[in-house]
Amino acid sequence: MAITKRHRILPRDIDAYALAGCFRMLTRQQLKGWLFSDVTEAMVTRFFDRSTERGYLGVERLQGNGIQVCWLTKKGRDFLVDGGHAAASDLFPASGPVPAKDFEHTVEIVNAALAMRRRTPTPDELLPAWAVQRLFAGKLTVWPDLLCLWKPNEDAGSALAIEVDLGGEPVKTVLVPKTLELIGFLTSWTADAPAAILLLTATARRRDSLREALGAAVGDFPLAVETLAALSDEPR
């Protein structure tokens, strides 16, 4: 029987499933900005409809009429893996949205990844925290929220570790030691390749406090502290 247009798997559908599986959860706005920026909202809705009908994505509007989010299901993971579209180790299937306590943090990590994808040169890889942990087989005691990698080409390649701070952790007793440990990891892992850290925080006041606390501690290691809004192309 011929495959109808209704049931055809489009290349952008596959990319969207893999993207959701990489970052655990995406908002509708993030998915549209990443893959559907050139189409109407109606086309995004149709994508969600056919993806949930297939069982490859879970989609939920939080609190009934709030922000719409999506995630890769186990059936979606099996489709990607069985079809040779992705490796199982690169996917994080789920049965629902991230817990409420992690929701804002997850959203901001994906916002940072989307902003980095729009930069030139674009990173070759964008690895969220869970993927970094898996890459190092759980041996790391500290890891970045997002690891951006540029592969060696005419240069040695480079790495940028991005941390998202929502203001809930003490600066001197938690963030400073954590940052120093992350510097140690990056320095040893990247060897001679350039590496840097970008710490994104919620407010200008918090940014200034972090700059003051970290400035003397990190020495010559390249570290920038900015607000979350500073990385976005749009006011937030």
Image: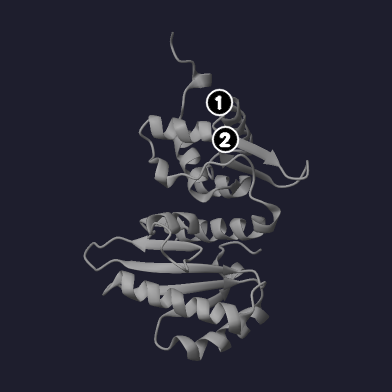
Observer-nearest of 193 and 6: 193
Apparent side of residue 24 relative to residue 158 in the rendered image (left or right): right
> Helix, strand, or loop for circle 2?
strand
Q: Can residue 120 be seen from the camera position used here? A: no
Whether residues under marks 1 and 2 lie with C-beta atoms below 8 angstroms apart, the answer is: yes
Q: Position of residue 203 (x, y in %)?
A: 66, 75
Q: Where is residue 119 in the image (x, y as percent from the top left)?
A: 44, 62
Location of residue 191 with respect to 36 vertically, above or below = below
Q: Give amino acid for label 2.
A: Leu
The residue located at (31%, 70%) in the rendering is 190
Placement of the C terminus among the 4 image quadrants: bottom right
Observer-nearest of 129 and 114: 129
Q: Give amino acid for label 1.
A: Arg
| Residue at image mark 2 | 57
> Helix, strand, or loop for circle 1?
helix
The residue located at (56%, 45%) in the rendering is 31
